[in-house]
Image (cartoon, rainbow, N blue to C red):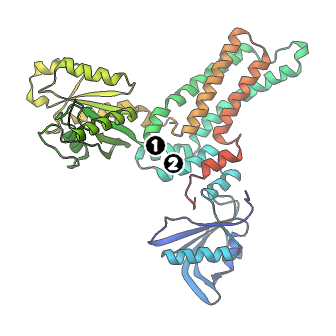
Amino acid sequence: MNFSDTIVALATPAGVGAIGVIRLSGDRAIEIVNKVFQPKDLSIQASHTIHYGRIESSGRVYDEVVASLYIAPRSYTKENVVEISCHGSPFIQESILQLFVEQGARFARPGEFTQRAFLNGAFDLAQAEAVADVIAADSAAAQNAALHQLRGGFSKELAALREELIHFASLIELELDFGEEDVEFADRQDLEDLVNQLLANIRPLVASFRTGNAVKNGVATVIVGKPNAGKSTLLNALLNEDRAIVSDIAGTTRDSLEDEWTLGGIKFRLVDTAGLRETTDVIEALGVERTQAWVKKAQVVIYMADATSETPVGFAAGVEALGQLDIPVIKLLNKVDQISSTELAAFEDAIPISAKNRSGLNDLETALLNVVGLDQVSTSGTLVTNLRHYQQLLQTQETLEGVLVALKTGLTGDLIAQDLRYALHHLGEITGQISNDDLLKNIFGKFCIGK
């Protein structure tokens, strides 16, 4: 893959808009634009300046534009960068793009601007991936997590861990060079203490992925229960709109309804499902099957029961059946305004609500935020939101736990050294200190073209 040429792409979304921004990066970026920019000579202008002019070629005026100059290394990619702000007509944008290609640029590949920034040392791989997360963020929590990673918070933690490990790994490797002399340069107790310290830092990062994944992708939250329990009424109450049809007739909801709801800066994907019951109605039976499929994909299940018709035994049985799936279950008892306090007391640990009257919803909201780990989201601590990072951290954790076993069982230095190498490799892959072309192609290929 050639990274020495000059690339060009539309940096704003395709389609009609007030303006469009065309970005060029590479050694010849200023030269290429200068060929068709009038009336100023951009080659003698200072970095971080903007210039009003026209894009002209062969007597044709393409558009009146503003050119922004960023001279290497003071740019996003650490190369010469020019950004052309033109009018938002797709015809004008395509014409200017084609003109720049005729002058010597080539169309950028997906994510190539950010990939060049990474390869030129502007930031590490974890920070580069955070660029895409910032662009895709659709909630306050997702934005905060991505910005924390983009600013290098996650990378700094990993760098500190890796640096400490490198010191001991080098001592172990040194022992191997003097193997015949039976010397120990690395104190085994100090190494064990270090590994325990590293694990104390890595385990919370691994554990944070559940919350981080929820923050980044939203929490699949499925509302289940028997027909007429008030599931659709609850959905409408949470969304504050009449999204689902509500009726006293059991079995009204025969298919799943899905909508997004933001709570505490976290996006929840709410799914209202068909009531769980035996039925001879073919259509309703299909709805029940879909409910069961949704439950298997859920990250949180709200089990809802009608307080006027459900028994404590039946309620407990329904919760127990869901508990076998190893998914957090929030127990909800609806229509409590129609029963006595004595009857309510028989339903242990259930959150009492009246979906119709919108009472008790604050307790439900608190329970949902607790399930996804609001305490982690609301602090400045690092959340692991990237599956690749999680997998590498998990492998690092497993490898370091292997080092502890090796130390306690008195295994030889060469076996310990091998495990330390693996741990360093996995940590290095997260930040890109160890990478390969296939990994980079897979990561940056998911970016938009102009980024």
Whole-percent x, y for residue 416 in the image: 74, 19
- Work out whether residue 131 or residue 231 is closer to the camera in this orientation and state it: 231
Q: Quadrant of the C terminus?
A: bottom right
Determine crowd level at label 1: few under 14, some 14-19, many 20+ residues with C-alpha closer than 10 A.
Answer: many
Q: Position of residue 204 (x, y in %)?
A: 52, 27
Give the residue furthest to the right.
180
The residue lying toward the viewer, choosing from 183 and 285, is: 285
Confirm whether residue 449 shows in the render.
yes
Name the residue located 15 percent from the left edge and 22 percent from the top edge: 344
Q: What amino acid is found at the position of numbered circle 1 in the picture?
A: Lys
Percent x, y of residue 89: 48, 76
Local crowd size for mark 2, using a 10 Å CA cut-off: few (<14), some (14–19), many (≥20): many
Q: Could you say which disc has been placed on residue 302 in the image?
A: none
Residue 75 rendering spot, x and y as whole percentages: 65, 60
Residue holding disc 2: 133
Label 2, label 1: how far apart the Cα atoms are: 8 Å
Query: Are circles 2 and 1 on residues that touch, CB within 8 Å?
Result: yes
Name the quadrant containing residue 355.
top left
Q: Kindly identify the amino acid type of the residue bearing the numbered disc 2.
A: Asp
Where disc 1 sits, the SS reads helix
Q: Quadrant of residue 332?
A: top left
In the displayed structure image, the side of residue 263 where residue 4 appears, left or right: right
Residue 379 in sight in this render: no
Closest to the observer, 68 or 373: 373
- At 75% from the left and 61% from the top, the residue drawn is 4
The residue singled out by tag 1 in the image is 216
**Tag 2 secondary structure:** helix
